[in-house]
Amino acid sequence: MSGLLRAGAVLALLAGLGCADGRVPLTVYSPHGRDLLLLMEKSFEARHPRIDVRWLDMGSQDVYDRVRSEAVNPQADVWYGGPRAIFARGAADGLLAPYRPAWAGAVPPESRGAQDLYFGAYRTAPVLAFNSAAVPAAAAPRDWDDLLDPRWKGKLLIRDPLASGTMRTLFAMVLARSVAETGSTDRGFAWLRRLDAQTKEYLQNPALLMQKLDRREGLITVWELTDMLWQKQRGAPLDYRFPASGTPVIDDSIGLVKGAPHPAEARLFIDFVGSVEGQLLAARDAFRLPARSDLPAERLPAWAQQVLRSMVPARLDWRLVEGHEQEWMIAWDRSVRGHGGAAAAAPGRR
């Protein structure tokens, strides 16, 4: 049995048995990583001492797959984190229950799922990242097309998009733009084939991606803003920049799992995550950019104010992305992954 399955089995068993100290177990599935999950666990439990938060950290796609596989007998209470496109699939599959938190009106209408099934909690975006000890800032990629420069061939590392909501969103942006500009995904897939030809390796988890970039096993990548801010704080020789033509700003969402074993406690947790207190806590201590639009910029930490000044949101048809992302990724896996070499010499850019 894999480590993830063992952890899930233990978590499910503990949830079924309850807590020895009489607290109510609250199970959270999330791609947010240990730092934010521990922060929210401890902060929430301090305000609700009768609840014991138990979380399982995995990729965005893995959360969807797990919630879907458990739909007949749900084990999770809260689905905490992931792009709205994945949440939209979860909603269409009947995996989420409606709940309108007290803070729902504080996020923009486009950050709210239909029928109150999910809401944006944070905003994040893919950025162009590089090993700053090996690549001077002046030479680093400035926009998406720069990733296709021949000098980066074999030096590009990519997080496997089948498991990563961040990379799925980026690839979907490329394809949605192709549809908007030409009426077809052909040009977008041609661009992704050229990107594949540049790619040294697709990595299965973010930790390995950062480790290889740190060790110069690759020099550039595309990755998620929050993780890059953590890496810089920890002193890693890594830096990033926002692409000049715009980046798809992701509504990092949260929702109540349908059939949750502890729905009342789950609603309390969702309320806390999107509260002013919870949003400012995550911004200050975990590099999360609040989805709430009612927070004055001066209340945000310096890093968040800088991001708001520098980030250029890409214009994107999110309904198109939500409706086609899954089929596009299946097509990418079948016809693009490992097939980019033939397209490496193709002229033109997206």
Image: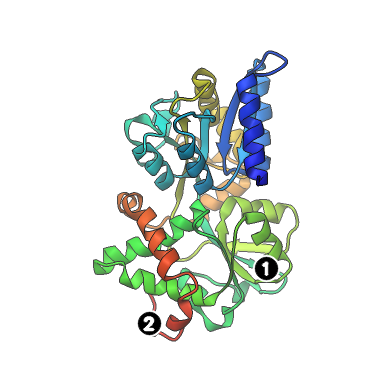
Q: Position of residue 314 (x, y in %)?
A: 40, 58
- Asked if one can make out residue 247 in the rendered structure from this viewpoint, the answer is no
Scheme of image coloration: rainbow
Q: Position of residue 162 (x, y in %)?
A: 49, 57
**Quarter holding the N terminus?**
top right
Q: Give the residue drawn at x 35%, y 53%.
A: 321
User: Which type of secondary structure does the marked residue at label 1 adopt?
Assistant: strand
Q: Give the residue drawn at x 53%, y 36%.
A: 80
- Asked if one can make out residue 222 in the rendered structure from this viewpoint, the answer is yes
Q: Position of residue 335 (x, y in %)?
A: 41, 70
Residue type beneath disc 2 = Gly
Residue 348 numbered mark, or none: 2
* Looking at the image, residue 323 lies above or below residue 78: below
Q: Give the residue drawn at x 36%, y 38%.
A: 93
Residue 288 placement: quadrant: top right
Residue type beneath disc 1 = Asn
Q: Quickly name the residue at label 1.
A: 131
User: Which type of secondary structure does the marked residue at label 2 adopt?
Assistant: loop
